[in-house]
Image (cartoon, grey):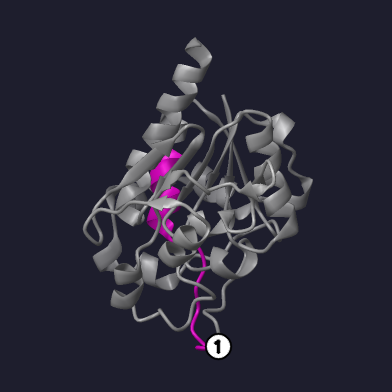
Amino acid sequence: MKILMVLTSHDQLGDTGRKTGFWLEEFAVPYFVFRDAGVDLTLASPKGGQPPIDPKSDLPENRTPAMTRFKKDAEAQKALSRTMRLSDMKSEDFDTIFYVGGHGPMWDLVDNPESIALIESFYNSGKPVAAVCHAPGVLHRVTYKGRPLVDGKRVTGFTNGEEETVHLTNVVPFLVEDELKRLGGLYEKAPDWQSRVVVDGRLITGQNPASSSDAARALLKLMELKAAA
């Protein structure tokens, strides 16, 4: 099985002067879930090379076992430092695509024509699409059969309450929860910061960092069912 994992290349948190990037837990957890399952992994980002880690995600209070493992894993670090350019990726080379969250994608992936075309190509060819936390925001311009992809589908993503807690409601280009609802998505959520993963057909969305493992496992399970069918 071949999975394409997509990360942000964006490191500026709006006009705040602070740094952002991808959320380390949301990369490390799925990365090891996939790698331990023997998946052939390819990492990509808009600019290629080393994607920026959100410094907040690397603070001791946010550390998880998968992050600790990542720090000791030279192979994983090397893979992350050499992401491919997103523009070079083609859906026919992979079985599915997984978008890593963090605030970064809100600036360089949500309106990215290459990302939008890639997601549409995966989905149109019958392949699952998965996104965690802020990454469901990358679906906001993705269409399927002339309508928003999320229209009428059960979805989740970073909640308005979670955004409020991190004081970035007025910094992000849009609120993931509001945008998914605006597009006709049937938005669901767990209490803030608890895991929630929604699978609707070939679309898998996770609410927050805590959902990373469940989202990755849900994708593997969907791929197994697809293979069995």
Tell me, yes or no, if residue 85 can be seen here.
no
Q: Position of residue 227 (x, y in %)?
A: 52, 15
**Residue 77: percent from left, percent from top:** 52, 50
Q: From the viewer's perspective, is 173 left or right of 123?
A: left
Image vertical order of residue 54 relative to residue 13, above or below: above
Relative placement, left or right, of 139 versus 165 is: right
Residue drawn 51% across the image and 33% down it: 202
Quarter of the image for residue 47 reads bottom right
Give the residues in magenta. 15-33
Q: Is residue 57 magenta?
A: no
Residue ID at (51%, 72%)? 174
Kindly identify the residue that appears in the image at 73 percent across and 43 percent down. Answer: 89
Badge 1 density bin: few <14, some 14–19, many ≥20, Cα 10 Å: few
The count of marks equals 1
Closer to the camera in the image, 190 or 14? 190
Look at the image and tell me in which quarter the N terminus lies.
Answer: top right
Vertical order, 103 against 67 (above or below): below
Q: Position of residue 125 (x, y in %)?
A: 68, 30
Amino acid carrying mark 1 in the image: Asp
Residue under label 1, please give it: 15
Q: Which element is circle 1 on?
A: loop
Q: In x, y percent, where is residue 19?
A: 50, 78
